[in-house]
Image (spheres, rainbow, N blue to C red):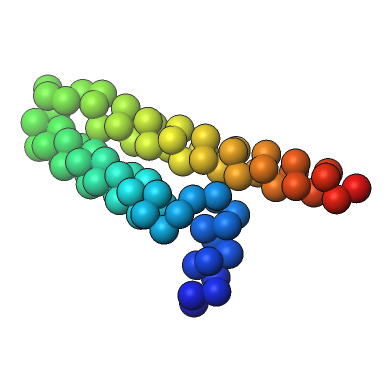
Amino acid sequence: MFKNSRNHLKEVKQSYWQHFYFAMSCAFWCEFSSLIMFLHGIWPGILKEDGGNFILKQAEKINKQRAKSAADRLTKNTEKL
């Protein structure tokens, strides 16, 4: 488990605390989006697009991180050639 964690941190080029902040930030906004969507489900006239927008923003943030990691891996692999 710890070896996998260290490998993952190396892959994403983040320290433990950087990764912790990133993951907790995403978790918070996902929970917040859930609350907004719950309230929208009860009262359809409020918060019409807010929940979806928060979810899309988090997905974009995660995809940027993934793209950065993939680009770093590609660079690393081409340097070996």
Residue at horizontal 34 percent and vertical 36 percent from the top: 55
Q: Is residue 1 left or right of residue 57?
A: right
The residue sitting at the left extreme is 43
The residue sitting at the bottom extreme is 1
Residue at horizontal 25 percent and vertical 32 percent from the top: 51
Query: Splitting the image into 4 quarters, where does residue 30 fall?
Result: top left
Foreground of the two, 52 or 27 = 27
Q: Relative to 3, does residue 22 appear above or below in the rendering?
A: above
| Residue 58 drawn at (x, y percent) | 38, 37
Foreground of the two, 79 or 8 = 79
Residue at horizontal 30 percent and vertical 44 percent from the top: 25
Q: Relative to 29, does residue 17 appear above or below in the rendering?
A: below
| Residue 4 drawn at (x, y percent) | 55, 70
Residue 52 makes an appearance in the image: no
| Residue 76 drawn at (x, y percent) | 75, 47
Q: Is residue 64 left or right of residue 70?
A: left
Residue 72 makes an appearance in the image: yes
